Amino acid sequence: MNHEAYPIHYIEHHDQRLYVELIQTVETRQIAWVRPLMLLSMPRSHGDGIMASSNPGALDLPGLNADSSLTATAYDLQGESDVLCPRALLREALDTEFIPLLSATRHPTGQSDRGCLRDFFRQICSEHPELFARPNG
């Protein structure tokens, strides 16, 4: 099996970050073909600035947040369907940011990863429909 290395990008929305491989872009339509790798769900900060999570599948990820240690949940999405999405959503990820997450990915107890990708894009579509509109012409 021949596996080509693709650049890693992410899509950030509220307290979640979806890491993807960028397979191809279609510049004329401003869309990207991406392969989901991991959805990182970062808990919201409380008033005292401390990040907290009660999720049993939570990960302690020091260094992701420059100010403090961050507890987050990482969902392994390798093997999920590829996605076409607006190019404007993608940001380039640093290797030093993403590689440590790979070894830390766990499945939270009692939760399925299947619906989280769909829910992630559903939220983006509902809040930013202009990004998904067909261009005139």
Image (cartoon, helix red, strand yellow):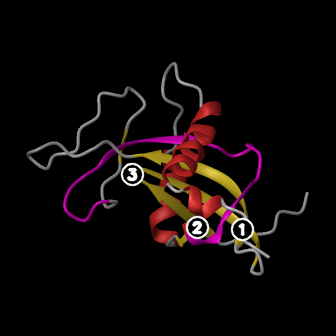
| Residue 68, horizontal then vertical, whole percent | 20, 56
Q: Which quadrant of the figure contains the N terminus?
A: bottom right
Judging depth in this view, the residue of 88 and 105 nearest the camera is 88
Query: Which callout, 1 or 3, points at the residue further toward the start of the chain?
Result: 3
Query: Which callout, 2 or 3, points at the residue further toward the start of the chain?
Result: 2
Q: Which residues are magenta?
A: 65-88
Residue sticking out furthest to the right: 1
Is residue 81 within the magenta segment?
A: yes
Counting labels gives: 3
| Residue 37, horizontal then vertical, whole percent | 63, 52
Amino acid on which the number 1 mark rests in the picture = Ala
55 vs 90, left or right, is left
Query: Which callout, 2 or 1, points at the residue further toward the start of the chain?
Result: 2
| Residue 36, horizontal then vertical, whole percent | 66, 52
Taking the image as drawn, is residue 19 in sight?
Answer: yes
Q: Which quadrant of the figure contains the C terminus?
A: bottom right
Residue sticking out furthest to the left: 48
Residue at which label 3 appears: 14
**Residue 114 quadrant:** top right
Label 2 environment density (alpha carbons within 10 Å; few <14, some 14–19, many ≥20): many
Asked if the residues shown at circle 2 and circle 1 are in contact, with their CB atoms under 8 angstroms apart, the answer is: yes
Label 3 environment density (alpha carbons within 10 Å; few <14, some 14–19, many ≥20): few
